[in-house]
Amino acid sequence: MLKNIKAVEILNKIIIQCSRNPKILFVVDTIGALLSCAFLFMIAKKFSLNFGISETVWVNLSLIALLMAFYSTFCSLGVKHRWMSFLISISVINIIYCALTIGVLIYHWSELTALGKTYLSAEIVVILLLVFFELNTAKTISLKK
């Protein structure tokens, strides 16, 4: 139980820090989307057979991740005010991307290898964790007002 309390304290400290400088979350989102794009494109071009579904699916997911990276970059560089609305919008975009990835996972379940299932599942978990921080940071910002 003590470990759970410590974990909650750490999460709260991260959220408070992010609410002081929300740009951090957009930078993290940009880096994550670029990494996702690179991995998905690499899988598409070199390892699609090892992951179990066609190159086209991986390329399409990588292009969506690239668009998300552009949006997050715009937010991190261009947004000076109204952080809360942009945090909510990137959270919604991330949730939609997760839903699409879950759809790919379900639709191609029988074709995906264990490696493909693991990669897509891990990507979903990481993005949902980021969404958790984005939404809680937006909430903390709104409570300050």
Image (cartoon, rainbow, N blue to C red):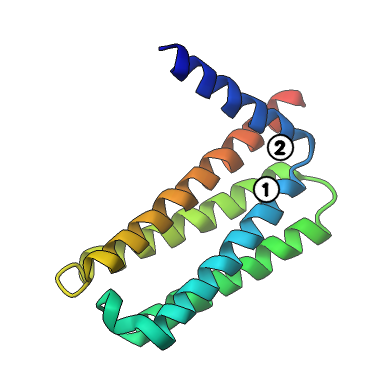
| Element assignment for label 2 | helix
Q: Residue 86 at what x, y percent from top left? A: 68, 51
> Hey, what amino acid is under mark 1?
Leu
Question: Where, quadrant-wise, is the C terminus in this rendering?
Answer: top right
66 w.r.t. 122: above or below? below
Q: Residue furthest right?
A: 80
Q: Residue 19 at what x, y percent from top left? A: 73, 34
Q: In the image, which disc is placed on residue 25?
A: 1
What is the CA distance from the residue labelled 2 to the residue labelled 1? 7 Å
Among numbered discs 2 and 1, the one appearing first in the sequence: 2
Q: Residue at x 45, y 19 (%)?
A: 4
| Element assignment for label 1 | helix
35 w.r.t. 26: above or below? below
> Hey, what amino acid is under mark 2?
Cys
Q: Residues within 10 Å of mark 1 (few under 14, many from 20)?
A: many
Residue nearest the observer in this picture, 10 or 29: 10
Q: Residue at x 80, y 55 (%)?
A: 79
Q: Quadrant of residue 15?
A: top right
Q: Quadrant of residue 55?
A: bottom left
Q: Residue at x 33, y 82 (%)?
A: 48
Q: Residues within 10 Å of mark 2 (few under 14, many from 20)?
A: many
Question: Where, quadrant-wise, is the N terminus in this rendering?
Answer: top left
Residue that carries the numbered disc 2 in the rendered image: 18
Q: Residue at x 62, y 56 (%)?
A: 29
